[in-house]
Image (spheres, rainbow, N blue to C red):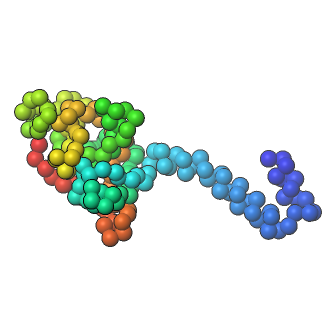
């Protein structure tokens, strides 16, 4: 840091080089705040796979196009409602992030689909039931059961890209 200060006050430094150094220093001073914002407040995510079609990435299975979405990271498990779309750490592959719709909350009785071993399931305390919108192409709670709310990382709130589909994502009500 002393070297930078010495450079800035040197008679050999030009005004343009001082401006450049100040600009870089200003940008670097914001880096921790930007990292915090991206990790804890909002993040832009890319949606891959057809499981949330047609709400997200409706052309993924035919054209490979991905939606870019805005994910709210701040306290995502608080105030969950049926119909919200969330991202979470996959219970069967913890290194992968998944995106599904909240179908049922703790205490709700869910009518399950194959391959789930029981026709009905009550969602336990601290868990949610998550399903993809595309039933035949979704690895969801019907495969791995209720998901702990502690695995939820974000709420998907807006589609950002493609621009012709950009906008707020509504809460779709589906029966459990």
Outermost residue to the bottom: 164
Above or below, 168 relative to 153 = below
90 over 39 or under it: above or below = above
* Coordinates of residue 128 in the picture (x, y in percent): 22, 37
Quarter-of-image position of residue 94: top left
Name the spot of residue 116 as percent of width and height, x first. 14, 32
Residue at screen point 36% across, 69% down: 163
Q: Is residue 71 left or right of residue 39?
A: left
Q: Nearer the viewer, residue 115 or 106?
A: 115
Q: Residue furthest left?
A: 119
Which residue: 36% across, 66% down? Answer: 162
Q: How far across and down, in percent of the image, does residue 132 sit?
A: 22, 47
Of residues 121 and 161, which is closer to you in this image? 161
* Quadrant of the frame with the C terminus: top left
- Return the residue found at the far front: 62
Residue located 29% across and 35% down the image: 149
Location of residue 77 by image quarter: top left
Image coords of residue 99 (percent x, y): 30, 46
Q: Camera-side residue: 109 or 132?
A: 132
Residue 25 appears in the picture as rendered: yes
- Can you see residue 169? no
Residue 111: quarter of image: top left
* Residue at x 34% of width, y 51% of height: 48
């Amino acid at each position: 840091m002393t070297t930078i200060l010495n450079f800035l006050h040197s008679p050999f430094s030009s005004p343009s080089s001082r401006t450049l150094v100040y600009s870089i220093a200003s940008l670097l001073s914001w880096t921790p705040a930007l990292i915090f914002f991206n990790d804890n407040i909002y993040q832009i995510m890319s949606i891959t796979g057809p499981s949330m079609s047609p709400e997200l990435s409706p052309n993924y299975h035919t054209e490979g196009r991905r939606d870019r979405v805005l994910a709210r990271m701040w306290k995502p498990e608080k105030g969950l409602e049926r119909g919200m779309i969330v991202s979470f750490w996959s219970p069967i592959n913890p290194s992968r992030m998944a995106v599904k719709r909240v179908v049922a909350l703790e205490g709700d009785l869910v009518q399950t689909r194959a391959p789930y071993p029981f026709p009905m399931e009550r969602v336990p305390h601290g868990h949610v039931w998550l399903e993809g919108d595309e039933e035949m192409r979704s690895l969801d709670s019907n495969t791995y059961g209720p998901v702990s709310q502690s695995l939820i990382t974000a709420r998907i709130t807006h589609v950002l890209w493609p621009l012709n589909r950009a906008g707020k994502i509504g809460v779709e009500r589906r029966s459990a």
